[in-house]
Amino acid sequence: MHEARSAQQARCSILDRLKVLPQYLLPKQALTLLAGRVAGARGGARTTRLIRWFARKYGVDMDEAENADVASYPTFNDFFTRALKPGVRPIAEADFTSPVDGTISQFGAIDDHHMLQAKGHRFTTTELVGGDAALAARFRHGSFANLYLSPKDYHRLHMPCEGRLTRMIHVPGALFSVNPVTARGVPNLFARNERVVCVFESPQHGRFVMVLVGATIVGSMATVWHGVVNPKRSGRLAEWTYSDQDIVLAQGEEMGRFLLGSTIVMLFEPDVIEFDTGWKPERPVRLGERMGVAPA
């Protein structure tokens, strides 16, 4: 029985790697630039047709949108980052709440400094935050959560708890897809893709990090304090510090958005969060639902 299960897992792993093989060959940067231009173009009727096709294909629930008229969006990006109606995502009374609509990829304890990407794949906190070992050390034996946003999801990102912004780091990298098949088939995926690392301090919960991970055709990532984070792709890290500013975001407040979908990874210090017992990998989550509590 055990041998049969191991053989099945091995076959699945090989199939996943074969499925993602074309991504190594595709011109991902060029495709992403092209997608960004299309998504930002004011194409009139062509834009409306694209939005209608996308909404039908992926089952987007426009009844939840503040503006349900697809013909009124001047660009695809405006549609993709649409606001929700007030009150459709109430914030639960909990220490930590889900920052997005999406699906749980993985979550749990950080093993020394390793996190689980998918079965058979792990990556480190140091790799994720762009090589800053001192920052990563704060999360040794801490906790992490990795949430995937599919094309149909609401694509604004919100705060899991109150936090004061201290740093933002843009880490250059690849632009593989971040869907579940790719997560199983591409080693070190979230630490090799382009990403934006946002560092916060909370008086109740210590330091925590929200990492916005880019992907193929994700035109850009944006934050409410900076706008689009899209420095020239020079291959070098870019960093901003905010110690001289008082940028404090409340729990549930918008902090950023993806211009086309991707993944967010959160890091918490040790003994800060106990995840809700209902959380399981591959389970859908909604913005504002209970994610966890501070240990008693």
Image (tube, helix red, strand yellow):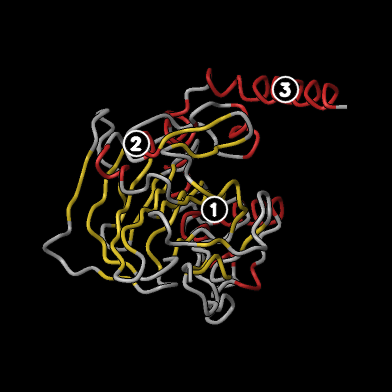
Residue 166 located left or right of residue 258: left
Give the residue type that dot 2 points to. Thr
Disc 3 packing (10 Å; few <14; some 14–19; many ≥20): some
Give the residue type that dot 3 points to. Leu
Residue 230 located left or right of residue 210: left
Task: Report which residue position mark 3 lands on.
Answer: 15
Could you tell me residue 144's position as x and y percent?
48, 50
Q: Which quarter of the picture shows residue 129? A: top left
Between label 1 and label 3, give the one nearer the viewer: 3
Q: Earlier in the sequence, mark 1 or mark 3?
A: 3
User: In this view, which residue lies farthest toward the front?
Assistant: 296
Could you tell me residue 131's position as x and y percent?
29, 34
Between label 3 and label 2, give the one nearer the viewer: 2
Circle 2 — which element? helix
- What residue is drawn where x is 48% and y is 31%? 31
Task: Report which residue position mark 1 lands on.
Answer: 47
Q: Which mark is residue 126?
A: 2
- What residue is drawn where x is 26% and y is 38%? 132
Q: Which quarter of the picture shows residue 194? A: top left
Of 125 and 256, which appears nearest the observer? 125
